[in-house]
Every structure is written in C-alpha cells, then in structure tokens.
Image (spheres, rainbow, N blue to C red):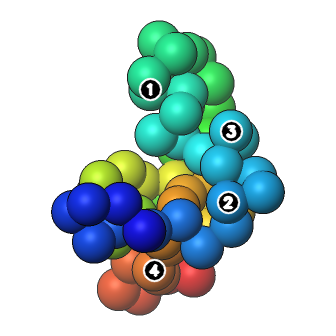
C-alpha cells in the first residue's frame, strides 16, 4: 500500500498496468488496451478493456 492508501492487487504484474505505461509515455499501448473499456481502476480512474491491466479494477456499470 502506498502512503495515500492505494494498492495494487497484482504487484507481480504491476509493470504491465496502464499506470506504468502512462509513466513511460506509452500512449499507443494504453489506447490498444482501452478501446472498449469495461473496467475502471479505483486508484487512478484509468479505463481498460481487461481487469488485469489495472492495479485496483472494478467493473463499469453494465459491463464486465
């Protein structure tokens, strides 16, 4: 858990999460993984097609 109380539910795969792609400036990779979002990250509000691309995912209403 970070100082702000946020956490990653899959720290082993954290380097493959959208927040890390954003830090690295990998916009094309983010766009590929969020073209039809069904999940939102409860830490940073990123949207993704698949839950495994987010640190703390939750299904969007009516999706997932």
Disc 4 element: strand
- Between the C-alphas of marks 2 and 3, the distance is 8 Å
- Between the C-alphas of marks 2 and 4, the distance is 16 Å
Q: Which residue is mark 3?
A: 15
Disc 3 element: helix
Q: Is residue 55 visible?
A: yes
In the drawing, does residue 48 fall left or right of residue 45? Answer: right
Q: Are marks 3 and 1 in contact (CB under 8 Å)?
A: no
Closer to us: 8 or 30: 8
Tell me residue 48's x, y (percent). Answer: 52, 54
Query: In this view, which residue lies farthest toward the bottom?
Result: 62
Q: Are marks 2 and 4 in contact (CB under 8 Å)?
A: no
Residue for point 46% across, 40% down: 19
Whichever of callouts 1 and 4 sits on the residue coming sooner in the sequence is 1
Residue for point 57% across, 82% down: 64
Q: Nearer the viewer, mark 3 or mark 1?
A: 3
Whichever of callouts 3 and 4 sits on the residue coming sooner in the sequence is 3
Q: Which residue is mark 1?
A: 22
Q: Which residue is mark 4?
A: 58
Q: Nearer the viewer, mark 3 or mark 4?
A: 3
Q: Is residue 29 above or below residue 40?
A: above
Disc 2 element: helix
- Between the C-alphas of marks 3 and 4, the distance is 19 Å
Residue for point 45% across, 80% down: 58
Q: Which residue is mark 2?
A: 11
User: Are there few (<14), some (14-19), or many (20+) residues within 10 Å of tag 3?
Assistant: few
């Amino acid at each position: 858990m970070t100082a702000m109380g946020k956490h990653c539910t899959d720290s082993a795969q954290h380097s493959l999460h959208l927040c890390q792609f954003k830090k690295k400036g990998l916009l094309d990779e983010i766009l590929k993984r969020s073209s039809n979002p069904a999940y939102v990250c409860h830490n940073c509000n990123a949207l993704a097609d698949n839950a495994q691309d987010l640190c703390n995912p939750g299904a969007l209403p009516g999706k997932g």
